[in-house]
Image (cartoon, rainbow, N blue to C red):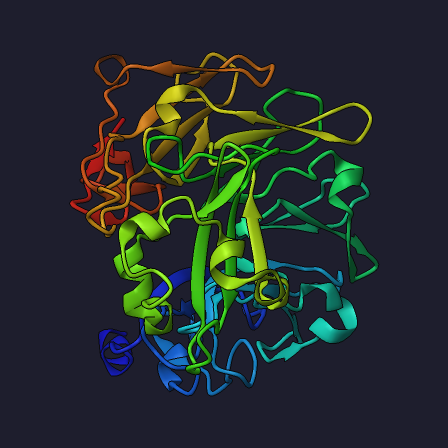
Amino acid sequence: MEALFEEKKISEETDCLFFDADGDGDQDLYIACGGNEFPSSAAALIDRLYFNDGKGNFNLSEQILPSTQFESTACVRASDIDKDGDQDLFVGIRLKPFRYGVPVHGYLLQNDGQGKFQNVTLTAAPELENLGMITDAIFSDYDQDGDDDLIVVGEWMPLVFFENEDGQFKKVASEQLGLATSYGWWNSMETADFNQDGKPDYVLGNHGRNSRFRTTVEKPLQMFVDDFDQNGSPEQILARYEDDKLLPFVRRHELVMQMPGLKKKYLRYKNYVGQTVEDIFGASALAKATQLQVHTLQSSIVLSQADGTYILKPLPDVAQFAPMYGILLDDFDADGFLDILLAGNFDYVKPEMGRYDASYGTLLKGNGKGDFEAIPAKQSGFRVLGQARDIKYLTIKMSNTSWWRGTMMPCSGSKLMWE
């Protein structure tokens, strides 16, 4: 197995999934590959499927996944979406290399029962095309009709529901679900029934509120993406409201370095101060650009309501100290109610923005009604240093008679926490 991985070490692995692809009763392995450092022509972006021979030996499939295009994958999830007894896949694409902000696809891959996957997106879920910049997804029967629906989140995206109707996935209008203003910089998602109404709820990791970025529904953060200077490479113009003026985040010297054609227009900083994005680029240029927005940066819980809608509710303040990625759900204090374990941070930030590293992880105690209380680290014993990207249970046999169970955070400076 190590030799197989060594052959592909140039790739950047972004997610993985153990599941029974070929129906032989053992766990096969799908590895998602992505990143923003490879061009779309790079074979390093091809996802990989390894078949298990039942003895822990894995062989690489020759399939080009998730499609004939080489794409930067964010996540992979399995479900028997057509109810034929085998595991099918959803694969979410994170971004188009070197063109951040341009919407990309999600893919539905149908299994033939022997681990051969066919892209059926155009026929089974055409609305997955150009959906956005996907970061995570979950198969969940949100409408309680006995089949797995698909819920997808991403950056500059709302929470998106796809209803499964006999293997055909149709996008549900956000307004219909009460989630029209759920656009966020969502990083991750998990599901459980937190308010004990028998229907699934969702926990979402977001950017948090401990940064220079501020946004509201009335005055959202916005981004315009286009090749404004016509040099063959797109620019991303991030903008925020100050009073009623939509101003760029980028400073003058950074803007003219990227687009030298604007230097004569803004010879001095005093000429640049107070200029709106429309003043700088013109209304017609902005109208042609890809326009994105975000309404909330708070890590949140999405609670189901009796009428079939949802409420987007921020988690306690301690969950907003930094971007959250890792989410683990369990009844950690054995009181009969589900709790939430969170971890995150993000270090690779431009100096003027500062590192987002104020979180040491947090335990949120649930009350069975969808409310949560932050438990101090001294009481919970949960403390995470550095960047965390996921939290998983790990059970290790320590001897012939004893077992150790704990949580593992894949991250830089990761630690194992015992319980």
Image coords of residue 325 (percent x, y): 38, 43
Q: Measured along the vertical axis of the image, is residue 225 above or below residue 208?
A: below
Residue 327 image-quadrant placement: top left
Residue that appears at 19% across and 48% down: 351
Residue 1 on image: x %, y %: 28, 74
Query: Residue 355 at what x, y percent from top left?
Result: 22, 42
Q: Which one is in front, 112 or 353?
A: 353
- Determine the residue positioned at 42% across, 73% down: 97
Left or right side of 8 for 149: right
User: If the image is split into quadrants, where does the C terminus sit?
Assistant: top left
Report the residue at 68% width, 60% height from top: 80
Q: Position of residue 280 (x, y in %)?
A: 47, 59
Residue 108 in view, yes or no: yes
**Residue 32, placed above or below residue 164:** below
- Report the residue at 32% width, 29% height from top: 321
Left or right, 160 with respect to 60, comes to: right
Query: In the image shown, does 90 or 17 lie closer to the viewer?
Result: 90
Vertical relation: 241 (above or below) 52: above
- Decide: is 5 above or below 141: below
Q: Residue furthest left?
A: 413
As drawn, is 17 to the left or to the right of 159?
left
* Quarter of the rendering containing residue 42: bottom left
- Count of number-bearing discs: 0
